[in-house]
Amino acid sequence: MKRKIIFLVLPVLVCIAYLGSFIFSYDRVLRYKDKLLITDVARLVPRKVRSVDTAHTVDDLKAVLADARQKGLRVSIAGAQHSQGGHTYYEDGVVLDMTAFNKVLALDEANKVITVQSGARWKDVQAYASPYGLAVKVMQSSYVFTIGGTLSANAHGRDTDMSSVVETVLAFRLLTADGTILNVSRAENPDLFALVIGGYGLFGVILDADIQLTDDAVYAQQSTLMDYRDFPAYFDSTIKDNKEIKMLLARPSIDPAPDSFLREMVVTTWSATSSTADGLHELTDEEYVYRDKFFFGLSRKFDWAKALRWSLQKKVEAGVGSVRLVSRNNSMRPPLAPLELLDYYSKQNTDIIQEYYVPVRNFVSFMDEFRSILSEGEMNVISSTVRYVKANNETYMAYSPREDSFAIIHMSNAGLSKEAQAHTETVTQKLVDAAIKYGGTYYLTYQNYPTKAQMRTAYPNTELFFGKKLEYDPMELFVSEFYKKYAQ
């Protein structure tokens, strides 16, 4: 009898364990965690560091830098560590963990300006500003990133008025390599303002920043399904000059079917409205995480699950054909901007992100080549989004310096083996060439797959940027694995 029960129960347990693998990362439970073996979210460039130092005060920061200078060590600056190219650590160096340096220092309600330490996360800013009826103007798609990390990457968001975070930064305080604290703005130390924002922590430690906020208005969220070839004209005629539309996010199809993959698009806008409802300004959090992780996990492995996810994204997530009311803060929080569902760990593979900026006029041509390269390269694409980025050349390493662009982001699941990574690197370099061909660039925040030559073609200021680095930090105190590859 016992054997019969075991015979019946064992397959059920095996099935449960298998289904659970799409939710839980079993490899994470079994791994040995070395606190000094540092990597970032993609786990592609692990390095052993000398120490990880947590800073709570300015004196803590100064002490770490002074000790590193005395011992001839290098320093890297880390926040949420969601970059994917070794930007936050350096082999045998000191990692400065800024996440405990996270206080909100002041709020100017009248001028809608918040002063916040660089280790604070955007969810901290939202939580502080929301009771005052204020909201973030520009941030990434998730609220878990630190303010210092966002400035260092000059991240962009969904806002159609100010698309890059540099546009919302009024000033910041910078701790330099020699221990000096400088106030940096467009009027004071303007050269450093253009270098530090989008400078990936190579010029000093951002202590705190004055950030422009806006009203936590109520928006009407609407989604439209269209062919990708119609998107530029739709954007020009319906969105670009429409002052009522405040935010935009487009999502191309990940359904592998030839008539759907990166051809169908759901275009979502958030428009000003006089409508409201009780509870709209209460900050939301991520819901149904296990459910969403399960479907996302399935889509890493099965094409039918990608098609299912795309169907659910159209009907449930975007709500094509319906109108939903949402506050501005909540439009940049879960469940509209989820992140926990992406938490994933495997010894065999990882999720990588790449991003390309292409002038609006060349969007269709680039997407055709983009789709072709990904398909021919048999990349396992599991997510894609498109955002609008206004032209801005305030920073040395501007990713959309000359004309308005669409940012095309894609996430693929890629193997971690040497052969798989070599293949992914080759495909990525082809995508970078395509972006350059159509007058665009790529985002430096992600993997170090592009070559040095590609970086210098996409970013003509590269040599000037690294020359400025040596001018402001001649002893190269602040470095990273990213810097090691592309500058040294």
Image (tube, grey):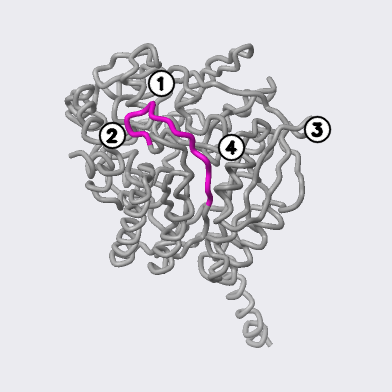
The answer to which of marks 2 and 4 sits earlier in the sequence is: 2
Residue receiving disc 1: 207
Distance of label 2 from label 4 (alpha carbons): 45 Å
Q: Is residue 346 visible?
A: no
What amino acid is labelled 3 in the image? Answer: Thr
**Which region shows up in magenta?**
385-398
Q: Image quadrant for the N terminus?
A: bottom right
Q: Amino acid at mark 2?
A: Val
First-in-chain label (3 vs 1): 1
Q: Which residue is mark 2?
A: 94
Choose the circle earlier in sequence order: 4 or 1.
1
> Where residue 322 sits in the image (x, y, percent)?
76, 49
Left or right for 328, reference 167: right
Tell me which residue sits at (32%, 30%) in the image: 396
Residue at numbered disc 4:
240
Labels 2 and 4 touching (C-beta < 8 A): no
Q: Is residue 429 magenta?
A: no
Q: Earlier in the sequence, mark 3 or mark 4?
A: 4
What kind of element bears circle 2? strand
Q: Position of residue 139 (x, y in %)?
A: 53, 34
Of marks 2 and 3, the one in the foreground: 3
Query: In whole angstroms, how far apart are the C-alphas of marks 2 and 3?
Result: 50 Å
Res. 484 image quadrant: top left
Q: Secondary structure at mark 3?
A: loop
Q: Which residue is mark 3?
A: 276
- Within 10 Å of disc 3 (Cα), the crowding (few <14, some 14-19, many 20+) is some
Marks 3 and 1, Cα distance to the nearest angstrom?
38 Å
* Residue appearing at x 17%, y 29% in the figure: 72
Crowding around mark 1 (Cα neighbors within 10 Å: few <14, some 14 to 19, many 20+) is many
